[in-house]
Image: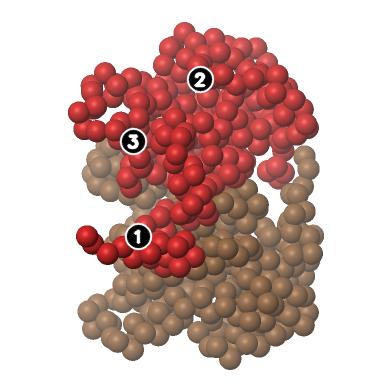
Amino acid sequence: MNGPPRIYENRVVLVTGGTKGLGLGIALLFAAHGAQTVLTCRWGSADPNEVRKRFADIGGLEPLIVEADVSRSDDTKVLFETIKKKFGPLYAFISNASNAATVQSVADLTERAFLQSMRASAWPTVEYTLASKEHFGRYPRYVVVISSDGPDRFTPAYDFVASAKSATEVLARYLAYRLREEDFRINVIRSRAIKTDSFTHTFGGDFYDFLRSLMSEGWFITVEEVAKATFGLCSGMFDAMTGQVVVADRGNTFADCISILYDNRKSLGL
Amino acid sequence: MNWNDFSGHAVLVTGGTKGIGLATGLAFGRRGADVTLTQKWSSADTQTIRVTFAEAGSSEPHILEADVSQDEDVRTVLAAIHERHDSLHTFVSNVAVAPAVRAFDQYNRRDFARCIDYSAWPIVSHVQAIKEIFGTYPRYVLAMSSEGSESYLVNYDIMAAAKAALETLCKYMNLRLRDYGTRVNVLRTRFARTDSLRDMFGDEFEGFIDRYAPEMFTEAVEVGEAAVGLCCGLMDAIGGQVITVDRGANIFDNFSRLYDQRDRLSLAIRKKP
């Protein structure tokens, strides 16, 4: 069996929040196709040697790991200057990092937390896209934004996260229109129920155990599955697709309702 | 994992001798798939199709006459594929037939039923027949659809209703078949320069779009590439989804865009008489 086609050789891919969970999985898949990856993380949130080893293990190029907070424009500037100096223009940008406040009760609904969440979770996609043009003279050929189905349906603690995701999806549609004559396309992947650090961080471990009592382990979406779909949108096969929101959940959301529990009520003892 | 190699895999595209169906068949063929194309009333020149496949480095496609609404025809097609393959990798349900509707009094039950038979039900009848003949479901099932069920398209009433039914069936089929490892999805586009577009929208439509919305045409080949993308193994997290590949036209096919581009399009503001 042949390895992955090396269609990303000599191409630079930026993944924000790329040192852990879904971001890391996506970056690894691009690296497996030959990409030079740039991963951002917040200060002290990743062990760079461990991350580098993951890339070495699959024969990928060593990633550049940059500490950059997506909510700080100073960090953005330094990041893009560094990428320009070391590698040149971005071919693909995966907007994955998201840092919105969680809401446990009505008392957590504050203006300050809302605005900070929008800044740290919705704005970075736009800021990085514009920074690409500013620093490299061109937009990335592909932008993929990682989102979730929170904007449409209730998710625990997700008030601000969902608001920010919703705003990002709208901005993606408008960017698709504004930049339609550029060699640029932007799409959004909504994933859900992927078991990563961020899932546990946002929902707490109990939510996983609760879902696990209702659905099989195979129901959960894996990092690899979403990484492949993200890469797929940047593979050249979806070049006529832009401004779209794609749900990467094997159809789980469609059947996330009381009717599926009714179907399975006997085996679940409900 | 080489997702770009379909060697040894059988792919069936209904209505595959023209337009988007042909582009889809070719996209699979170029990657090594053994492609079967069906047609019924198409006047396509099969020799030209064979040459196109050969030039793309594809093996020769199997072109069969078959009516998607006739179970016997469907079985004959599948039996022919089964002689060469133990399983069908990908089934693309592309055929759609509906009358162009110009006024409400042209709605009639017979046309509607026939449109469902040709444009919505074949995805079910084919997948059931595939299971019967091969013993397994295909790995990927893809329905070709359009945006007519969500926004008005010229003369599209009956077709849009069938597409809505088709898309809904796909969502349920994905749920019913996913435990067998099958992914069912829908690919939508808006406007492609095909015979189907001319048949439905009329001969003047293409020129009108060229004049006022030139960026709204999607190439058939772009839709074909996306079809392969959904069936190549990279997109296995996508199931029961409607994927729109139209260069963003669904976002900006509206009056706001016309207003935004009014100078470029020389759209003067008309005074009311």
- In the image, A186 versus B218, the foreground residue is B218
Q: Secondary structure at mark 3?
A: loop
For the N terminus of chain A, which image quadrant?
top right
Relative placement, left or right, of A245 versus B168 is: right
For chain A, what colour was chosen?
Answer: brown
| Above or below, comparing residue B93 to residue B250 in the picture | above
Badge 1 density bin: few <14, some 14–19, many ≥20, Cα 10 Å: few
- In the image, A119 versus A269, the foreground residue is A119
User: For residue B130, which numbered disc appears in the image?
Assistant: 2
Can the viewer see residue B190 in this picture?
yes
Q: CA distance from mark 2 to mark 3?
A: 33 Å
| Colour red belongs to chain | B
Query: Do discs 2 and 3 share a chain?
Result: yes
Query: Do discs 3 and 1 share a chain?
Result: yes
In which chain is the residue bearing label 1? B
Relative placement, left or right, of B51 versus A77 is: right
Residue B18: image quadrant is: top right
Which residue is identified by label 3?
Answer: B155
Query: Do discs 1 and 2 share a chain?
Result: yes
Relative placement, left or right, of B12 versus A119 is: right
The type of residue carrying mark 3 is Asn
Nearer the viewer's eye, disc 1 or disc 2?
1
Badge 3 density bin: few <14, some 14–19, many ≥20, Cα 10 Å: some
In which chain is the residue bearing label 2? B
Identified at 62% across, 48% down, the residue is A237
Asked whether the beta carbons under mark 3 and mark 1 sit within 8 Å of each other, the answer is no
Badge 2 density bin: few <14, some 14–19, many ≥20, Cα 10 Å: many
| Above or below, comparing residue A22 to residue A237 in the picture | below
Which residue is identified by label 1?
Answer: B255
Can the viewer see residue A193 in this picture?
no
Sequence order check, earlier mark of 1 and 2? 2
Sequence order check, earlier mark of 2 and 3? 2
